[in-house]
Image (cartoon, grey):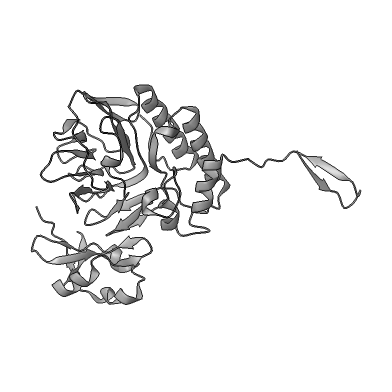
Amino acid sequence: MTYVHLLTITEKDSLIDQWFAPDSYFNPIEDANNDWIISVEEVNQCVNPKFLWVKDLPLIEYIPKD
Amino acid sequence: MSYKLNPTTGKLDYYESSAIVYDSDAEAFINAANYSLTTYKNAINNLVISLKEANIWSKITAMYPLLSDGINQSRLYQIKYNLKNPLDTNAAYRLTFAGGYTITGTGILFNGVNGYANTYLAPSALNQNSIHFGVYSLSNTQVTVNDIGSIDNPVTSGAVMLIRDASNNFSSRTNQSASNSVANATSLGLYITNRTGASVVNSWRNSTKIIAQTTTSATPNSFNMYIGARNDAGTATLFSNREYSFVTIGSGLTDDEIGNLATIIQTFQFETGKVIYRYV
């Protein structure tokens, strides 16, 4: 089972084109429920002080779009 | 040969130096990545020299050995550089990353959710009728993802490769609209797809040709090739969950050059301890 972190639309918009680690950028995508999510890797590896709040995002099961 | 002052005799003692003089291109890459391990430096040097001796070096546009020792620099810092042009710029086709990934001791593992690497190299920067691209996969997974490439929308031309889908097929587009495919029940090894003419396209697993077709080429698209996903006209899709250990992109290669390239890359993999299965 794969887990991801759930975003609001506002949160998703704030992560577009933003880095979470050197040379590494957030990549929010939609899941099967049309919710926006980012991966546990982005959250765990995030060292950008502007976006450390992602570490408090709720964890949900990942259901990919078909 | 070298000399060292002997403090006991006060004389100069002669001794054989084991220091290697690195090829200048190899040294530039070694310095950019700032490797500490001598075995890694020597392997990079052998890789570059071998590519030059086989007359393949000039046909490479971007090559990513995905090698990291994580000692003087972070592993991510070390694997991002293009062996052919190790500058930290998009124009040098230095990689950047998006989404979820893990840098392993043998390459980079994408998460199959949203992770990929951007080469900043579009097929339009290469010749329509002379292109090759390939990945060395350390994962054996049966899943419909995209291992490397880009495609336009609506589809007129793609440079993409899927080495093993959910139905156990390999498929590729090599500056063409329709895909070529063949049955393939493993995703382990070096996979290269290659075009050397308007109607000459082939694909390879290690040194074995698995596709030989006359599919007509189309004007290359202008979207950056992604590793670990497909760039669908600016949007990343088909995220891979495979680990990649080596990537090559460049001009079309002859059959002999493909065979030599496969041998050179496999030798590099052995020298750096990255091969984990029997080479076939």
Nearest to the observer: residue B195 or residue B9: B195
Which of the two residues, B234 or B1, is positioned nearer the viewer here?
A: B234
Q: Position of residue B275 (x, y in %)?
A: 41, 40
Whether residue A15 sits left or right of residue B34 in the image: it is left
Which corner quadrant of the image does residue A30 belong to? bottom left
Whole-percent x and y of residue A62? 16, 61
Q: Is residue A59 visible?
A: no
- State which quarter of the image contains the N terminus of chain B: top right
Q: Position of residue B108 (x, y in %)?
A: 35, 51
Q: Is residue B224 visible?
A: yes
Please identify the residue farthest to the right as the structure is shown.
B9
Q: Is residue A47 above or below residue B130?
A: below
Q: Identify whether B92 is placed above or below B178.
A: below
Residue B137 % position (x, y): 32, 41
Residue at 45 percent of width and 54 percent of height: B78
The answer to which image quadrant residue B197 occupies is: top left
Question: Residue visible at 56% across and 41% down?
Answer: B24
Relative to B136, residue B180 above or below = above
Number of marks in picture: 0
The vertical placement of A16 against B106, above or below, is below
Q: Residue at x 50, y 28 (%)?
A: B53
Quadrant in the picture for the C terminus of chain B: top left
